[in-house]
Image (cartoon, rainbow, N blue to C red):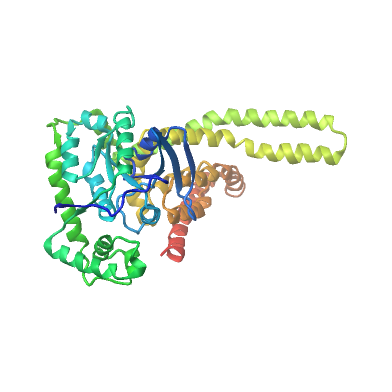
């Protein structure tokens, strides 16, 4: 695999300068976006979907850059919604520069996405983020050698400390004013097929807006989106050969540009990771953490809810004695205050629960907990994120459904929302105790236990049925 630099026919149009930020999930892409745009950003949804869209602006010198934070993705395929949004934006909107945010700790995975971007278009910048963590891990990254090997500008950054942010701004402005396209060559056999297919696609007027070489590569990978676009399907799938070539090239690049010091044993962070993601210990840690969250939620929020309830009752009594007409008293006391009060008493529960989840999310524990439970949830066509939302349903179904916003896959989010109400929440427990005590006497505890167990079984069966009927 080697580099070929292709000069464009015309320079970039600076009337509308757009910068796209792309990267794997959890590489600090949004943190870099915040560093670049500051308070000049808008949060909305991508057209037609519930995936969040962040757009901001960067003023540097006489140039204003519109920066778009694309969804995190590992590839530029078309299988997941995040991949499709990112790829469609690069193809349809044609941003002037694409910044691929790489993880300094796991640069190999980030470079794989970078190579796929370079197959699609030119004007790409690599920002290697979290370099401070890499130094702690004993890694030394030679950005000059890395840039020489890749043929593109490389900036070393740290969103946590601000290192390299100003340099990144300078590189973005410089890249927006120039243009070049890097082609990475594969084996001779595959290159012949790529050239033949690219020449064929260039003759089709409907495909003139697309890069013929990229269409050819995706056709050899049996990409469904490209196959529908071109109406052509290659006889053989070359995905493995193309992936192997990319990884061989990445390893060669990293061997000369990244040096690691010899490590002896684990540091504290790695030791904690090995415990909380252990296939056995991780489950006990997870259950303990969730138990503590529930205890904190209901222990702290209980008195607050009672305070709100008593305050509203006092307000209702005061206004009830002050209002003359019965219909107006009923409207204000029973309707407005009673109706609003029924909602407000849940605010402390929801606030404390989401604050606790926010702490777990920011600390990085929730992704690790989801990883521990993911294998079990896979049989239901769901993931560990869904399990966390369902588990919250034992406390409150409202919180359970609200927490599904952290699930990025729309189909999985919908299934989780539909099955969460089957989980027995704490509000149903008094009813269960009343019925069980009345009809079953001393066996009431066993009955309540099996009611909770039944709710879990119904939830699992519902998830399986919904996935089979609606999302095959």
In depth, the one of 207 and 359 nearer the eye is 207
146 or 134, nearer to the observer: 146
Image: 190 above or below 104: below
Kindly identify the residue that appears in the image at 51 percent across and 55 percent down. 418
Residue furthest toward the front? Answer: 10
Q: Is residue 413 visible?
A: yes
Q: Horizontal placement of 103 versus 228: left or right?
A: left
Compare residues 177 and 468 and report the one nearer the observer. Answer: 177
> Whole-percent x and y of residue 464?
43, 60
Q: Quadrant of residue 173?
A: top left
**Which residue is at the front of the view, 437 or 206?**
206
The quadrant of the image that shows the N terminus is bottom left
Percent position of residue 209, x then y? 35, 62
In the rendered image, which quarter is residue 365 located in? top left
- Number of numbered discs overlaid on the protein picture: 0
- In the rendering, at what x and y percent does residue 67 appear? 40, 42
Quarter of the rendering occupied by the C terminus:
bottom left
Q: Is 321 placed above or below 99 here?
A: above
Residue 470 drawn at (x, y percent): 46, 64
Residue 271 in sight in this render:
no
Residue found at x 12% / y 41%: 255
Q: In the picture shown, does residue 200 fall above or below 68?
A: below
For image coordinates 50% across by 49% down, the residue present is: 423
Horizontally, is 251 left or right of 74 in the view?
Answer: left
């Amino acid at each position: 695999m080697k580099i070929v630099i292709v000069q464009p026919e015309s320079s970039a149009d600076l009337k509308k300068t757009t910068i796209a930020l792309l990267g794997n999930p959890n590489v600090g892409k949004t943190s870099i976006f915040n560093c670049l745009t500051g308070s000049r950003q808008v949060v909305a949804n991508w057209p037609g979907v519930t995936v969040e869209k962040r757009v901001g602006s960067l003023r540097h010198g006489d140039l204003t850059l519109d920066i778009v934070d694309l969804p995190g993705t590992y590839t530029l395929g078309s299988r997941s919604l995040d991949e499709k949004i990112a790829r469609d934006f690069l193809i349809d909107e044609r941003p002037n520069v694409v910044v691929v945010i790489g993880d300094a700790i796991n640069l190999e995975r980030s470079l794989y996405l970078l190579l796929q971007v370079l197959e699609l278009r030119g004007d790409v910048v690599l920002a290697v983020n979290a370099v401070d963590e890499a130094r702690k891990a004993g890694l030394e990254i030679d950005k000059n050698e890395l840039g020489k090997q890749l043929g593109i500008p490389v900036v070393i950054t740290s969103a946590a400390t601000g290192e390299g942010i100003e340099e990144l701004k300078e590189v973005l402005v410089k890249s927006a004013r120039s243009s070049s396209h890097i082609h990475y060559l594969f084996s001779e056999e595959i290159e012949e097929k790529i050239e033949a297919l690219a020449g064929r696609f260039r003759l089709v007027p409907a495909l003139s807006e697309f890069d013929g070489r990229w269409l050819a590569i995706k056709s050899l990978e049996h990409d469904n989106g490209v196959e529908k676009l071109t109406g052509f399907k290659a006889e053989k799938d070359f995905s493995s050969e193309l992936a192997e070539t990319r990884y061989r090239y990445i390893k060669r690049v990293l061997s000369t540009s990244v040096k690691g010091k010899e490590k002896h044993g684990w540091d504290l962070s790695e030791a904690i990771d090995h415990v909380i993601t252990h296939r056995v210990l991780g489950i006990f840690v997870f259950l303990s953490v969730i138990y503590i969250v529930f205890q904190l939620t209901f222990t702290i929020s209980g008195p607050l809810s009672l305070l709100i309830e008593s305050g509203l009752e006092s307000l209702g009594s005061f206004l009830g004695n002050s209002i003359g007409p019965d219909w107006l008293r009923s409207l204000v006391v029973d309707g407005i205050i009673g109706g609003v009060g029924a909602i407000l008493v849940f605010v402390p529960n929801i606030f404390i629960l989401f604050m606790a989840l926010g702490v777990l999310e920011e600390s990085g524990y929730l992704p690790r907990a989801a990883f521990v439970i993911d294998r079990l949830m896979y049989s239901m066509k769901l993931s560990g994120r869904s399990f966390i939302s369902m588990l919250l349903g034992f406390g409150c179904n409202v919180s359970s459904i609200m927490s599904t916003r952290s699930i990025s896959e729309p189909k999985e989010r919908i299934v989780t929302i539909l099955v969460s109400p089957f989980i027995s929440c704490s509000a149903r427990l008094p009813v269960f105790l009343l019925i069980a005590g009345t009809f079953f006497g001393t066996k009431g505890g066993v009955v309540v236990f099996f009611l909770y167990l039944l709710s879990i079984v119904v939830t699992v069966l519902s998830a399986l049925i919904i996935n089979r009927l609606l999302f095959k």
